[in-house]
Image: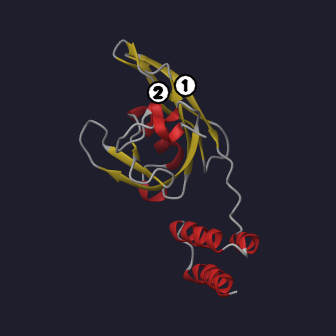
């Protein structure tokens, strides 16, 4: 039994404590700029519905350097987040979230970021290999004979924004199995 879910903090944002079990690769669904000085950006992620990644100014600089300033281009792009226990708040090491990999990079990207007052340090992110496209047809075929698995596949396809034709194909396969 996995206890990961039992230690997740209750929050509307992803916290460094969420990444204590290791890095996580996520997909951007949308970016909302709220304004203000404290946490002005919500990066909504497919894998964490209802919870936003609120990148630090340094991580926002990395995203802009890699993907450009127009957040409309960010949807569907992927990034790997990890917990860096060395991040400080004031004099205390509190840990924080940093980006290790970004999709849509051809080569590693190094950006000079402020490390401490008056000192800059290079921060490098690596290219994130693109995920192989999902073969929905193969998944339908592999789940044939299992109505519950086909229903789950339909839900996954709907959440992934797949075409009405594919959703109908999955529904038809589930209906055929239910009738048989």
Say which residue appears at 51% left-offset and 66% top-offset. Answer: 159
Q: How many marks?
A: 2
Contact check, label 1 and label 2, Cβ < 8 Å: yes
Closer-to-camera residue (128/68) = 128
**What sort of colour scheme is used for the picture?**
secondary structure
Q: Residue at x 47, y 27 (%)?
A: 113
Q: Residues within 10 Å of mark 2 (few under 14, many from 20)?
A: some
Residue 84 is situated, as x and y percent measured from the top left of the image, at 51, 25
C-alpha distance separating marks 1 and 2:
6 Å
What residue does disc 1 label?
122
135 horizontally vs 25: left or right: right
Q: Viewed as shown, does residue 148 lie left or right of 113? A: right
As drawn, 2 above or below 76: above
| Of 19 and 91, the residue lying toward us | 19
In this view, the residue in front, 152 or 17, is 152
Report whether 61 appears left or right of 140: left
- Looking at the rendered image, the quarter that the C terminus falls into is bottom right
Q: Is residue 36 above or below residue 154?
A: above
Q: x, y (%) of residue 171?
A: 60, 81
User: What percent of the width, then of the height, locates residue 41?
Assistant: 35, 45
**Dot 1 lies on which element?**
strand
Q: Earlier in the sequence, mark 1 or mark 2?
A: 2
Q: Quadrant of the N terminus?
A: top right
Which of the two residues, 118 or 156, is positioned nearer the viewer here? 156
The residue at the point 46 percent across, 31 percent down is: 17
**Around disc 1, counting alpha carbons within 10 Å, would you say few (fewer than 14), some (14 to 19), or many (20 or more)?**
few
Local secondary structure at mark 2 = strand
**Image point 45% across, 21% down: which residue?**
87
Give residue 71's position: percent from left, percent from top.
42, 54
Label placed on residue 160: none
Q: Residue pushed farthest top?
A: 91
Indicate which disc residue 113 carries.
2
């Amino acid at each position: 039994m996995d206890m990961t879910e039992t230690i997740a903090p209750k929050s509307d944002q992803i916290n460094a404590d969420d990444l204590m079990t290791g890095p996580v690769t996520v997909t951007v669904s949308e970016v909302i700029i709220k304004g203000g000085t404290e946490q002005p950006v919500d990066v909504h992620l497919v894998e964490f519905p209802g919870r936003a990644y609120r990148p630090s100014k340094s991580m926002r600089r990395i995203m802009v350097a890699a993907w450009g300033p127009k957040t409309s281009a960010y949807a569907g792009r992927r990034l790997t987040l990890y917990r860096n226990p060395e991040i400080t708040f004031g004099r205390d090491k509190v840990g924080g979230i940093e980006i290790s990999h970004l999709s849509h990079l051809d080569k590693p990207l190094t950006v000079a970021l402020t490390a401490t007052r008056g000192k800059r340090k290079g921060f490098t992110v690596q290219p994130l290999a693109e995920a192989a496209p999902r073969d929905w047809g193969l998944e339908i075929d592999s789940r044939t004979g299992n109505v519950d698995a086909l229903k789950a596949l339909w839900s996954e396809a709907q959440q992934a924004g797949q075409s009405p034709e594919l959703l109908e194909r999955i529904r038809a396969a589930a209906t055929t199995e239910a009738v048989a």
